[in-house]
Amino acid sequence: MMETRILKVDPAMPDRETVLAAGRIIREGGLVAFPTETVYGLGGDALLSSASKKIYEAKGRPSDNPLIVHLGTKSVREMARYAAEIPEDAKKLAEALWPGPLTMVLPKRPEIPDATTGGLSTVGLRCPYPQAARRLIASSGTAIAAPSANLSGRPSPTTWQDVAEDMDGRIDAIITGARCRYGIESTVLDLTGSVPTILRPGWYPPYLIAHILGKDCVYDPALFAQPGEDYRPKAPGMKYKHYAPAAPVTILKGSFAQFCAYVDANKTDGTMALCFAGEEALLPVPAVAFGAEDDGAAQAAAIFSALREVDKRGAKAVFARFPQMDGVGLAVFNRLVRAAAFRVIDLGGAP
Ligand code: TXA
Ligand code: MG
């Protein structure tokens, strides 16, 4: 066990001394968790194998799962330090959407060790939004490899307290900040093929990327397959059970009335529901809401803290409502279905 320092900063104006101290930890090969607009990241020097190995160790994460490399600015010069090729599409997207929740997969430069990319010849680059994140990267003088700052398999952290819950004693420091604005991880976009392909759905939908690029952008078909024998997603992180509370989660597809009836018929001691805002009081079991039914953005912002909350309340089994599969709702479903280890029951009726 090491002592984890909590570095309190004002999110709007992170103070220089603290950021410098945190940058020094990264430069010396240590680990610092920091706020981003999506989820909190667990950062280490992206150019240092030993730092990446420490990240895997702290998370208890399989080391074939590549880390996203975070940049302090959206300049092409900075991208060129880590990516071997920067296609026009990448420049356009950096200009339009960075800093922001987009990760672009590009051929990597040899300086990035295999330990950071899980042995892949590509690297995921992203420039995060919050000042504290970008100033930390700048003051570290390197790029920062950072997965979500949760123990492997647990819901991603959207507050610094969530990070402390999982990482206290396992990393050098946590930079505090506000609750993450978007609440689900970045869109991961592969730009190494002939068609820009989304490997992990996130805040930015394909039609926005297509609009900026003036060409098609597609989802990786593996995203919609159940993991099985020949399920080999290009984003290795997508194949693991993930984001899960301790209790088994089952998603129920159907109307609210069908949901209530099913939960009532199948409830036992410790059954809880993950429902849409406003439904809590109408359910036959204790419930935690994750945003309104027609509000994908609110669902994204709340889903991970709701998954942590059912754990805190000692749920033994969890039934969850089925999010709408459009826009950011698709990204919410992608996280929830992994938390549910792909258990979805169709109650029939209207879609
Ligand atoms: O919003 C985010 O992206 C957050 C914050 C901290 O920036 N980070 C994050 O990292 O979600 P992580 O490690 O939890 O998820 C990274 C995802 C995994 O699914 C991984 O397989 C994929 O991105 N990925 C990273 N590099 C890749 C690469 N070179 N090729 C394909 N997929 C890659
Ligand atoms: Mg993660």
Image: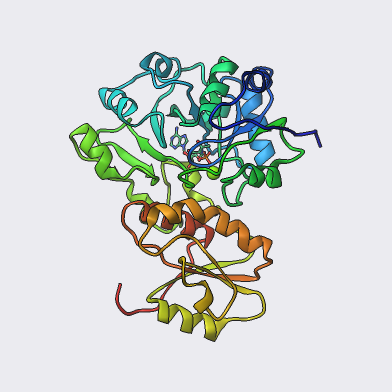
Q: Which quarter shows the N terminus?
A: top right
Q: Is residue 230 visible?
A: no
Q: Position of residue 336 (x, y in %)?
A: 48, 58
Looking at the picture, does residue 106 appear above or below residue 188?
Answer: above
Number of numbered discs overlaid on the protein picture = 0
Which colouring convention does the figure follow?
rainbow
Residue 253: x, y in percent? 40, 72
Left/right placement of residue 332 relative to residue 89 reads right
Say which of 209 and 346 sits in front: 209
Residue at left 69%, top 46%?
A: 166
Is residue 337 visible to us here? yes
Residue 316 against residue 258 in the figure, above or below:
above
Is residue 272 or residue 251 the one in the foreground?
A: 272
Residue 268, quarter of the rendered image: bottom right
Q: Where does the image place residue 147, in percent across and percent down from the top left?
A: 55, 37
Residue at 47 percent across and 23 percent down: it is: 71
Q: Residue at x 60, y 45 (%)?
A: 159
Q: Residue at x 52, y 43 (%)?
A: 180
